[in-house]
Amino acid sequence: MNVKARNKMKILFADDGSEHARAAIKLLLDLPLPSETPVHLLRVFPAGQTHAVGQMEKDLNVTREELLSHQMRVKSELLLGDPAQKIVETSEQTRPTLTVLGAKGLRATLGILLGGVAQQVVEYAGSPVLVVRSPYHGLRRVLLVTDGSPSSRNAVRYLGRFPLPTGIDLRVMHVLPPLISPVIMEPYFGGRDTYLPTPAPEEEHRILAAQEREGKVLLDRTCESLSKSGLNASPVLVRGDAATEIIAYAKEEQVDLIAAGSRGLNQFQGWLMGSVSRKLVHYSDCSVLVVKRKEG
């Protein structure tokens, strides 16, 4: 793939003045974006913060000048309203190829709360969303997670076009499911006994071996797809609870960015409790890129 084509982006940057937003700016400036990359710089404040509008304008101008100094084409906007709602609305209107924001801002001092700004933007924005965490130490190691679903394949295609820095350490992870034994309920007078029968060793070995073969095929296919986009990736195959294994691996290997696919929701579907992408945004220590796949 042509490098210029891969680096071409249209960015919506949601700035809330927090340390995580500052980290997001640093990450954004580390991407090999071409000059004149369009950036819509957005600051949204609720009615209770109208007294600080003057300072917000100054902070917004600081960010704007910083982006302009890197030859980006910047449009800045200061809006009154609910931050998550306004960011999602702006995303729908401008159709960016990437929405960027900090992991937690002034309204979420205890972390990303369920229903917090970042979480809602990830759920409802139509574009891929990059949630950046502070402290930011550079973009050196990226972990792409895949389960072979259409959402994951969409994330692979998107990452193939994403402007990653040269020499990035890219890894692709697939998490095999734990071997779950069937539950058998044996009735007896006054209640039931519960048994968790263990499969015969040869049957368990057959199941595990088949899953591992399928996992390796998926990883090889994903790495080959990324190679066609000029990205060299290393496969990682583990077993267990998907979100737990991904987060633990990212922490142990000092991953700077996790990329994952997500089916995405509309306003009528509500929250999908327990989704892997939500847990990654909620619990991981590093930045997370969630690539949405709209249904229909």
Image (spheres, helix red, strand yellow):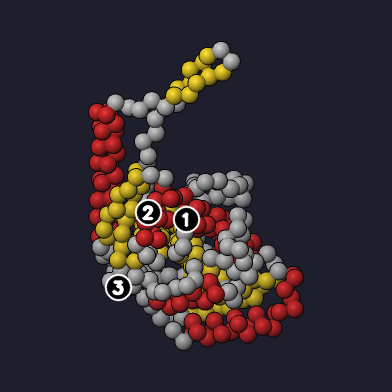
> What residue is pinned by disc 3?
166
Mark 1, secondary structure of its residue: helix
> What residue is pinned by disc 2?
145
Relative to the observer, which residue lies in front, 22 or 165? 22
Residue 104 percent across, percent down from the top left: 57, 66
The residue type indicated by label 2 comes to Val
> What residue is pinned by disc 1?
280
Judge depth for marks 1 and 3 and give the one in front.
1
Image quadrant assignment for residue 8: bottom left
Residue 193 percent across, percent down from the top left: 50, 21
| Mark 1 vs 3, N-terminal side | 3
Mark 3, secondary structure of its residue: loop
Relative to the observer, which residue lies in front, 252 or 147? 252
Q: CA distance from mark 1 to mark 2?
A: 11 Å
| Mark 1 vs 2, N-terminal side | 2
**Alpha-carbon neighbours of circle 1 within 10 Å: few (<14), some, or many (≥20)?**
many
